[in-house]
Amino acid sequence: MKPIRTRTARAIAVAIVAGSLTLTACSGNDKGDGKGTDAKSQKDAAEQQDPVVYGDAAASTGPAKDVAGAKQGGFINVYMQSDLTHMDPGQIYVSDAGQFSNLIHRGLTNYQEDAEGNLTVVGDIATDAGQSSEGGKVWTYKLKDGIKDEDGNPITSADVRHTIERLYSKVIFDGPTFVQSWLSGNDYRKALPDGPYKGKHLPDTVLETPDDKTVVFKFNQPRPDLPQALAMAGYSIVPAKQDTKAKYDKAPAALGPYKIAEYKPGKSMKLVKNDQWDPKTDAVRHQYVDGFNFTNTVSQASQTKRLISDQGEAKNAIQFTDPVDPAQMADVVTNPQTKKRTIAGYQPYVWQLTFNLDRVKDKKVRDAITYAIPSQSMVQADGGRYGGEVAGGLLAPTLPGFDPTYDPFGKLKKPNGDIEKAKELLKEAGVKEGTKLTYAYSNTPRGQAQQVILKDALEKLGFDVQSKEIDRASFYEQIGKVKNPYDLYMTGWGQDWPSPSTVITPVYDGELVADGASNYSHINDKQVNELIQKALKQEPEEAAKTWEQAHHRIVEEINPAAPVYYSKQLQLYGSNIGGARYSTESSYINITDLYLKQP
């Protein structure tokens, strides 16, 4: 999410009106190629509301609409600071891997994005976004003809069943769990503990494949969000013949326009065209360039420096999910020639200082730390007004019903913290001078800079702060262990699709405290859990009120995570890159429309 190594990939907001879905795309989709960008505000995040429907067969039929002026050929150079977190679709739940997934994987559905950033859910390997029946409890998908993996094996409904069922096995520990839990409950692994690997399957009353072209999902309650859930990278297809279990994470088989030609873990990767991909079956992706050369050892500062200089290979280069280096931000935004090679947008992510509730048990201590956090300084370490805005709550401005005045800890009035208030609370809590706190942080430039800021603020309160640096590639895996040894850690989260359910449920549902799950604070509050279950069963308008109630209880009465700032994105690319713009689907540079102006 990371790049922002946050656990999502949807930068859009949703409103539900008269039973239909209406998505609010993040504003600020500057098209690149000379137009440049400005810092985005909360107004930008919500000003554009365009209806988005689930696409029919016509909308789902390829090829994708051509990008004006696009040319064929050449290789794009991709700059990254470290390796991808995962390449196995079932393990993908952070944004760098999600961006990569758009190049090589395909799922039942996907988001089709127009030049203005407006989104439609369409069929990807399916003929449409899905046909619902029985009040939304049953969803049927028909598969397109001509879908093959990189070795030419046809994809059938058996591969879709295999894809879903392998998520139940212990092979998969780090991906989304929405569809599995909808089908089989929160303890879904008990329904098929070995996945499909020992010949057992989910019953037809849950998942049915009556023929090679048909897949039927059957739920015990309406699941109107299924087409959006299936569009997540984590539900992309893993062909049964290609599945190598744990080894698949290092060598996945491609269904998309590109495939892996060479991979050197921790160093580099080369993607080339997948000749088994048929553009007539794909309404979303293009295959303009011959491939992508990933270099996974280029620091954020070096990326920015190279792209500012725009010399040699940098002319054909992009930042993949990393933003412009905050220390060089002025060099980018004050130079018109450089600024016009940027894309910017308001992201769905909220950065928060998460408390391990198993270790930081006193709410007064958590509140004190929350008051003391110098949020504005944290934003400055991430690019200032181009990097984010001080947060009052845990739901981003891109979500429907966002309240810009919500600020229970007074962070908007005192953006650099209220040390005196914090000290009062610590005194009431009887906290002794020199009490130890262990703070875990990712070894990114942002993480390192913010560690200095947070440590200084906490030491002013009298804490003895033990800072523990974790490699960015394994950061979420390490803090995702329930028995982790850390008191505090910065985490980022945004909606998986446009609903508060995809924030509050995975991050704050007490039934989801487990290794590899996203409840990093280990909050398990009976009232919050009940509100979540209530909201999931309500009609959208009613649910919005329930989600708000849950959000207020989480922030004000429990405080498992201190809101710090809402995230924005600013990325730089080389002068020979064409088709660059901010993608509301990925929250980064749109990866599938890029081409080289001079191949």
Image: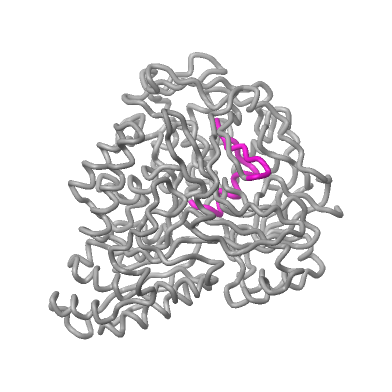
Name the residue: 69% across, 33% down: 151
Name the residue: 32% across, 26% down: 221
- Where 414 falls versus 118 (above or below)? below
The mark tally for this picture is 0
Magenta-drawn segment:
94-116
- Where 439 falls versus 572 (above or below)? below
| 554 or 89: nearer the viewer | 554
- Left or right of residue 484: residue 595: right
Say whether residue 111 is magenta.
yes
Residue lying farthest top? Answer: 210
Q: Where is residue 33 in the image (x, y as percent from the top left)?
A: 76, 56
Image quarter of residue 312 = bottom right
Name the residue: 36% across, 26% down: 222
| 398 or 523: nearer the viewer | 398
Say whether residue 494 is magenta.
no
Residue lying farthest right? Answer: 598
- Left or right of residue 196: residue 65: right
Name the residue: 41% across, 42% down: 499
- Left or right of residue 426: residue 266: right
Q: Where is residue 168 in the image (x, y as percent from the top left)?
A: 39, 36
Q: Where is residue 450 in the image (x, y as percent from the top left)?
A: 44, 75
- Left or right of residue 146: residue 101: left
- Where 531 falls versus 379 (above or below)? above
Render colour scheme: one colour
Q: Position of residue 539 (x, y in %)?
A: 33, 31
